[in-house]
Amino acid sequence: MFFVASAAILVAIILVVVRAIRGPTVFDRVLAANAIGTLAILLLAAIGFLTGRPEWLDVGLTYGLLNLISMLAVLKFFRHGDLAYDGEEERETKA
Amino acid sequence: MMEQIVDIASWILIVLGSFFIITGAAGMLRMPDLFTRMHAASVIETLGATLLVVGLMLQAGFTLVSAKLVFVLLLFFFIGPVAAHALAQAALHAGVEPMLDEDRRNREPPGGAEKNETDPVEPKT
């Protein structure tokens, strides 16, 4: 049954990769990358059980945290064009 | 006997989770604009991931592996909404408009009540 789950996750990853390639805006690609990260965690868990070595779950947890950080960094970069942006300019122009 | 029941339950959960994962991925491919695609992607993170991980937890039993799976679930529960919110806000800020049948932001309230003048939403033309 772990094989079924792994196969389903792989098919889902293929579909999401197609969306990442086709996605018209950069946000579609970020969304697809985030979904691929989520699916990769699940794939690590399923393959860990498939091969009888669930230690892969630690890798999955780390990967999930990195996934969030990388997504926020990419979004911030495309919103402000700069990762060191602290929001000062926006507040000044609004006031 | 008990083991068989747990085994069958975990089978059902894993297959259901796989089904919802494929459903969400197909939705991400088929939906017409970014926000509906985010809706489809949330199916993967909530129903798909939860069912699959709970199924794996039934397989693992009451062990350290189950504890790690609980942490994976917690990760999804806390990170999914944060990521979705950040993505939607960044997309709106960048000018990605949702696909709408009609713009209801400035319509007359039902019942002929007076229009709320303090409504800050301006019509976008």
Image (cartoon, coloured by chain):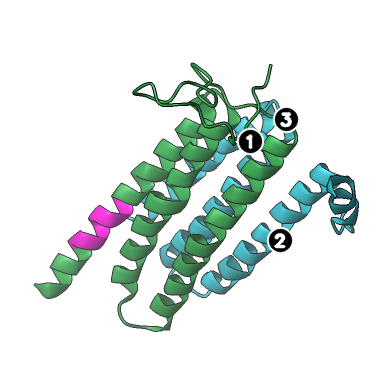
As helix, strand or loop, the secondary structure at mark 3 comes to loop
Q: Are marks 1 and 2 on the same chain?
A: no
- Label ID, residue B95: 3
Front-lying residue, A64 or B7: A64
Residue A69: numbered disc: 2
The chain drawn cyan is chain what? A
Query: What is the span of residues highlighted in magenta in the rendered image?
Result: B8-15
The Cα atoms of the two marked residues, 1 and 3, are separated by 18 Å
Magenta span: chief secondary structure: helix
Chain with green colouring:
B
Question: Image quarter for residue A19?
Answer: top right
Instruction: Identify the mark nearer the N-term, 1 or 3.
Output: 3
Q: Are marks 1 and 2 in contact (CB under 8 Å)?
A: no
Q: Is residue B115 above or below residue A49?
A: above
Q: Amino acid at mark 2?
A: Ile
Circle 2 or circle 3, nearest the eye: 3
Numbered badge on residue A41: none
Q: CA distance from mark 2 to mark 3?
A: 23 Å
In percent of width and height, residue B62 lies at 31, 82
Residue drawn at point x = 59 percent, y = 49 percent: B85
Q: Which mark is residue B120?
A: 1
Numbered circles on residues, count: 3
